[in-house]
Each structure stands twice: as structure tokens, then as C-alpha cells.
Image (spheres, rainbow, N blue to C red):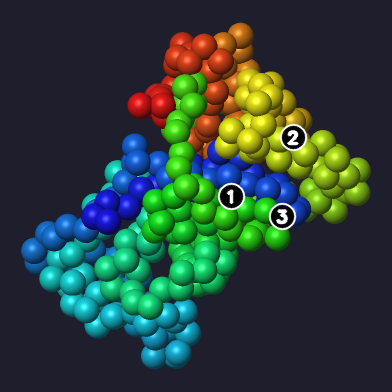
């Protein structure tokens, strides 16, 4: 692999934190690759390479990584040339981890659970805590389903259904703050019960329909998940996005933590709606 894709979480935002399912797929519309800019060291990439070398010396790598070779590459001007917008919920750090392990890692496990666990440890450098889902999708180039125990299942293929699109809110977000807000809300028993009784089943059905395992209406599932997210995750939806959350020909939902970055949309008509935001169709 010479290009490592980003990822889009079709369903599973926050539900994963309370025992729900998730479905993430590679996003070849945005990807990254290795390049060289002689004599110009990327300071952020150097920090990543230095951290890997440090945990290698501490015996904390999940598998062998040629950190010496990676450091030499970075110091020569090596860089990860990425079109994946950072902080947008599209897996920019996951793609970097996957690209690094593909080129400088060895003896990576075949078992998806072990691979995901090791990748989660490595991506923790960027987020403090990681599920490992983003780098797993990018490294394998395959859709990944997670069950409530976060056990990964690699899907064989994926065909983009006509009607999915990304909407760029143009708003910067803080993922850590949003997750903390959600965890605080979980202390309300009524809120948690509604998640378990309404939201998690809706997400599970939507995943089965999107994966072609249930012949029910994707329109209905996407609309329901959209409605429930607006009710349950209102603080994660910025006011400009809330104003256009649903229309006659489109529905929106979170794409990751929310708060800003990108949002995922569905158009039953299979075309981009007329909205005052930058949008990208995903069925091309």
C-alpha cells in the first residue's frame, strides 16, 4: 500500500462507549502518503518518531518497529503528505499510524483484535486514549464492524450507497471536551436508559441495513439516528449545523465526536442538497 486512507464512522458515535455497535469504512477520498522535503524536518513527525523510539527502549512497543530507520527518514526531510483534514473526525492520525507501521513495523499480528489493541496503544500518542479503530481501517483498507465488546470484524468489501455525503462545518472542535460532556451526561439514569433502549437498537439496525444484511429502509434508519442524535447529543451539534440538521431531501448525523469538523449526510434522492457549506459526495 502506498496511500493510506482516512476513515468515516458511518454509525457508532458515542454508542461505543455504552456497549453499542459501530461501522467504520475506509475513506479513499482523503488519504496520505510518504514524501521527502530534503533538509526540512517536520517537527510534529519528529515528536512521533521520538516517542516511538522512547517506548521501544522501554519495551512498550506492541511489535518490532524500526524506530532508527524512521528517525533517519524524518531527519532527512521525510514527511506524511496527507489530504485528510486534521480534527475533522476522518482519521488523520489513524492514517499516519497505519502508514508508519506498514513501512517500519514488522511481525504485526493477523488477529484483528490483537492488531486493533496494538494500534490503539500507538495512536494514544495523539489522543491520550484510542479505540484503535481508525488505524485498523486505514492499515487494512477494509471496513470494520465493532460489536458492543469492541471486537473487530473485517468486512470483505464495501460499495458506497448513493446518497452519502460529508459536510464541512468549518468549525474547530475539542474532542476531549465533548467526550467529557457525554460521560457527565451518563450519570443521569434516565439519559443512559434512553441510550440503551432507543439509540443503541437504532444504530444496530442502521448498521445491518447499511451492510446489506437487512432489507429495511436506509432512509428510515438514517432519519431515526439523526433525530435521536439531535435529541441526545444536542451539545455536540453547533448552532449553524443544528439549523440544517434535517430537510425534505437530507438528514445529517455526527461524524465522530461532533462539535465541529465534518458531519455525515444522507440524501434519499442521491444528490447533494443545497446548503451553505462545503460538501463532498461519497458515492463517487
The residue under the point 31% across, 46% down is 31
- Name the N-terminal-most of marks 2 and 3: 3
In the image, is residue 280 above or below residue 187? above
In the image, is residue 65 above or below residue 280? below
Find numbered disc 3 in the image and state the secondary structure of the residue it sits on. loop
Q: Which residue is the site of mark 2?
A: 202
In the image, is residue 248 above or below residue 255? above
The numbered dot on residue 87 is none
- Furthest toward the top, the residue is 248
The residue under the point 48% across, 16% down is 270
Asked if the residue under mark 3 is in contact with the one under mark 2, i.e. CB atoms within 8 Å, the reply is: no
Residue 93 visible in the shown view: no
User: Left or right: 22 with respect to 31?
Assistant: right
Along the line of sight, the residue nearer the viewer: 154 or 79: 154
Along the line of sight, the residue nearer the viewer: 110 or 47: 110
User: Left or right: 43 with respect to 247?
Assistant: left
Residue 62 visible in the shown view: yes
Q: Position of residue 151 (x, y in %)?
A: 63, 60
Q: Position of residue 55 (x, y in %)?
A: 43, 83
Instruction: Find the distance from the CA under tag 2 to the CA under tag 3.
Output: 14 Å
In the image, is residue 81 above or below residue 109? above
Q: Alpha-carbon neighbours of circle 3 within 10 Å: few (<14), some, or many (≥20)?
A: some
- Furthest toward the right, the residue is 190
Q: Alpha-carbon neighbours of circle 1 within 10 Å: few (<14), some, or many (≥20)?
A: many
The residue under the point 37% across, 61% down is 98
Foreground: disc 2 or disc 1: 1
Q: Quadrant of the C terminus?
A: top left
Q: Quadrant of the N terminus?
A: bottom left
Q: Which residue is the site of mark 3?
A: 148
Q: Position of residue 202 (x, y in %)?
A: 74, 35
The answer to which quarter of the image holds residue 26 is: top left
Q: Which residue is the site of mark 1?
A: 145
Amino acid at each position: 500500500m502506498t496511500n493510506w486512507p482516512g476513515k468515516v464512522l458511518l454509525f457508532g458515535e458515542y454508542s461505543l462507549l455504552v456497549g453499542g455497535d459501530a461501522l467504520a469504512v475506509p475513506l479513499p477520498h482523503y488519504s496520505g502518503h510518504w514524501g521527502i522535503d530534503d533538509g526540512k524536518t517536520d517537527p510534529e513527525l519528529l515528536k512521533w518518531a521520538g516517542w516511538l523510539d522512547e517506548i521501544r527502549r522501554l519495551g512498550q512497543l506492541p511489535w518490532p518497529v524500526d524506530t532508527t530507520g524512521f528517525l533517519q527518514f524524518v531527519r532527512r526531510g521525510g514527511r506524511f503528505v496527507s489530504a485528510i483534514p486534521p480534527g475533522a473526525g476522518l482519521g488523520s492520525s489513524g492514517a499516519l499510524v497505519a502508514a508508519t507501521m506498514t513501512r517500519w513495523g514488522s511481525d504485526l499480528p493477523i488477529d484483528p483484535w490483537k492488531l486493533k489493541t496494538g494500534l490503539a496503544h500507538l495512536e494514544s500518542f495523539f489522543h491520550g486514549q484510542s479505540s484503535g479503530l481508525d488505524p485498523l481501517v486505514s492499515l487494512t483498507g477494509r471496513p470494520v464492524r465493532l460489536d458492543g465488546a469492541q471486537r473487530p470484524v473485517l468486512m470483505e468489501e464495501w460499495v458506497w450507497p448513493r446518497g452519502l455525503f460529508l459536510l464541512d462545518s468549518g468549525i474547530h472542535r475539542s474532542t476531549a471536551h465533548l467526550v467529557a460532556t457525554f460521560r457527565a451526561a451518563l450519570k443521569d439514569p434516565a439519559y443512559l436508559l434512553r441510550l440503551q433502549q432507543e439509540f443503541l437498537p437504532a444504530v444496530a439496525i442502521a448498521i445491518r441495513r447499511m451492510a446489506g444484511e437487512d432489507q429495511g429502509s436506509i432512509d428510515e434508519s438514517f432519519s431515526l439516528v439523526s433525530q435521536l442524535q439531535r435529541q441526545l447529543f444536542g451539545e455536540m451539534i453547533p448552532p449553524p449545523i443544528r439549523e440544517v440538521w434535517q430537510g425534505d431531501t437530507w438528514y445529517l448525523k455526527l461524524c465522530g465526536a461532533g462539535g465541529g469538523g465534518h458531519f455525515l449526510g444522507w440524501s434519499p434522492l442521491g444528490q447533494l442538497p443545497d446548503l451553505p457549506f462545503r460538501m463532498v459526495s461519497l458515492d463517487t
